[in-house]
Image (cartoon, rainbow, N blue to C red):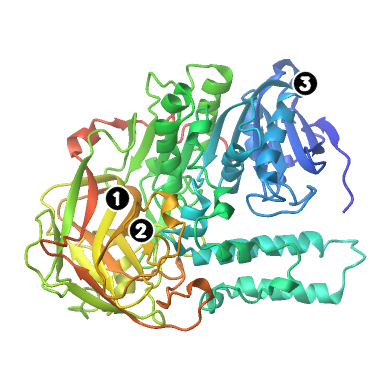
Amino acid sequence: MALTAAGIGTAAGVGHTAAQLPDDAETIEDEMVEMRDGRRLATDIYLPPENNRPAPTIVTRTPYNKDGESAGAAFFVEHGYAYVAQDVRGKFASNGDFYPYRSEGNAEANDGYDTVEWAADQEWSNGRVGTVGISYSAGTQWAMVHADEGLPPSLETMVPGYPVSSYYLQGAYNGGAALLSHNIDYLNGFLLEQIRRDDIVPGNEDFSPEDIEELSVWDRAQETMMQQYWSLPVQPYEPHERDEVDHIDWLFDWHDHETFDDYWEQQDSTQHYDEVDIPILNIGGWYDIFTQGVVQNYTGMAEEGGSSKARQESGLIIGPYTHGNNDMRAQGQVTGSAYQFPENVTFDRNAAALAWMDTHLKDDPSGWNQSGDGYAVRAYIPGLDEWIGADQFPLPETQWVNYYFHSDGNANVSTGVDEHNSRYEGTLSTDSPGDQPPDEYTYDPADPVISVGGYNSHWTGGVADRATAYHDRDDILVYQTDLLDEDIAIVGPITARLHAATSAVDTDFVVTLSDANPTARTGGLFVAEGARRGRIGDVEADPRDVNTYRNIDLLEPGNVNTWQLAVWPTARVFAAGHRIRVDVTSSDFPRYNRNLNTGEGLTGEEMVTADQTIYHDHDRPSHICLPIVPMDALEKRIIDGPTPNVGSSDEEGEDT
């Protein structure tokens, strides 16, 4: 495709009209910036008025078309910044071959480095650079820790929104289980874009009717994704055929590498916090597909950052959001209706990023004032329905309390007492179990539990009524407290420990925490979840350590293991009169692919059922460890909003 010459002009005459740039600002479109290997990446530059130059500079890099960055650019230009938006390698107007999160070797990391240093060296920049962006554009920021030379010397701060810390541990897999709906839908969408870019473009002399048919096949695959989730084997994925897809083997690679190996290390930040010497503001959501990564990036920097400034000044903003949706009150649905949080839940990411950049690129203490109300951690607590501030996470007042499983061997969900309610015989309490029989159920991969709510961006996510989907099933164990006498706040990471045996050589366990309100028709609102796959690594090892998942290790049928599951960090006040509820089962489909219980992994097609046994007696006390924060301590931490000196929605400006 022919390259377009760069053009320069005022915002009124040239550029993206949606930007609403100041009249005397300027834009430069499609500047082809050369990388170290000769590839040239299409870059748009938005400049403040000449009397405000040279200016501190913000860089964002995206695979979703840099043209969409104009509104965010206008916001920052209005506040005295130069703004650089770039199509990543192989996307839209940029040269090269695209490969998610890496591209042509280590290009994603090195391209970020080269772009930051190029921007810092321009006459319109004062040499001080920060980066912004969410999701993939957060990944391009963290990718720079893998650059050949390390972080660019001109980079002074980053504001990644909704990032992973380990693409293996949150993006493609969790607890060793493949994140099926995300992997297939996300990568198939990229594939459609790539086909259109490479083959179906106006004026392409090689265009043929066969190209139309190929595109039609992929479109149909996208439209019938739910049917594709059920296809076996998972690897190789149909309708893909490895030999027929030119330079587009992402999904094959993702599913070829079921364990954490050298392939995934290239996209893992957890091994590099001590090399990051700049402060980072991490933004995320309690119901995001990358929740664990957002929190881990903050705690990793606070504990291991490569300088005192990085450790002491890195920050975290987190609230009850699905992926990227901090401007929405509705974060899921309950019995067909949207679930609405209070108005104070929303905030403007641009306003938060601006306050952060003013402090770290302009040395403005009125921005993110760490010594005033600029708490390192700013979190929205559902149930309390307020923002709280803290200087660490988990909160210093946290009490780690074990809630033990109890039953007479009948914790399976019953057929229910009426149309809307089911009886649950399992209980949950802080009392240690005595001599109790285990609970048993049979997991059949041909009839999995269907995902409802939770950490999904390619399926219904967020708050949801779990009990409705569970009605009349006997392959789910439910343990819940008595009606609570007082409000209980759960804020932080959660670990479930299951003393469990299976009849299979491989199987999964999934643990879900819910808020059960007996006065409502809903049976349990999703709060948090975690999973563990038996054959990937050691099920008894630390589930948050990515190195745990390096090996294949089949289970010994009938052997009792102490499974450790990382239930992702969360925040919720369980109101007096509600119950804390924990569900244990062996599937959550299509969030995770179905474990076929045979040990063949993603290449398998044959299924066997697995007989599961959960022990909860004196010697094998299965339980969940909950981070309890006293209500009075939590209430003392209430603040005005997520951005220092700015209310939750006071600043105008669209999100970047």
**How far is mark 3 from mark 2, CA to CA?**
50 Å
Tell me the residue that label 2 is attached to: 530
Q: Are marks 1 and 2 in contact (CB under 8 Å)?
A: yes
Viewer-closest of 57 and 399: 399
Q: Who's the residue at 46% across and 49% down the image?
A: 328
Tell me the residue that label 1 is attached to: 494
Describe the element under mark 1 as helix, strand or loop.
strand
**How far is mark 1 from mark 3, CA to CA?**
50 Å
Q: Quadrant of the N terminus?
A: bottom right
Q: Who's the residue at 44% across and 22% down the image?
A: 308
| Residue 254 can be seen, yes or no | yes
Q: What is the residue that sits farthest to the left in this orientation?
A: 435
Tell me the residue that label 3 is attached to: 123
- Amino acid type at circle 2 is Gly
**How far is mark 1 from mark 2, CA to CA?**
9 Å
Q: Is residue 189 left or right of residue 651?
A: right
Find residue 355 and report its horizontal and vertical position in percent: 51, 26
- Amino acid type at circle 3 is Glu
Q: Which mark is residue 135?
A: none
Q: Who's the residue at 81% across and 65% down the image?
A: 200
Q: Answer with mark 1 or mark 3, whichever residue precedes in sequence.
A: 3
Q: Quadrant of residue 425?
A: bottom left
- Within 10 Å of disc 1 (Cα), the crowding (few <14, some 14-19, many 20+) is many
Find residue 101 and report its horizontal and vertical position in percent: 63, 50
Find residue 357 and report its horizontal and vertical position in percent: 55, 26
- Amino acid type at circle 1 is Ile
Q: What is the residue that sits farthest to the right in this orientation?
A: 205
Relative to 267, residue 73 above or below: above
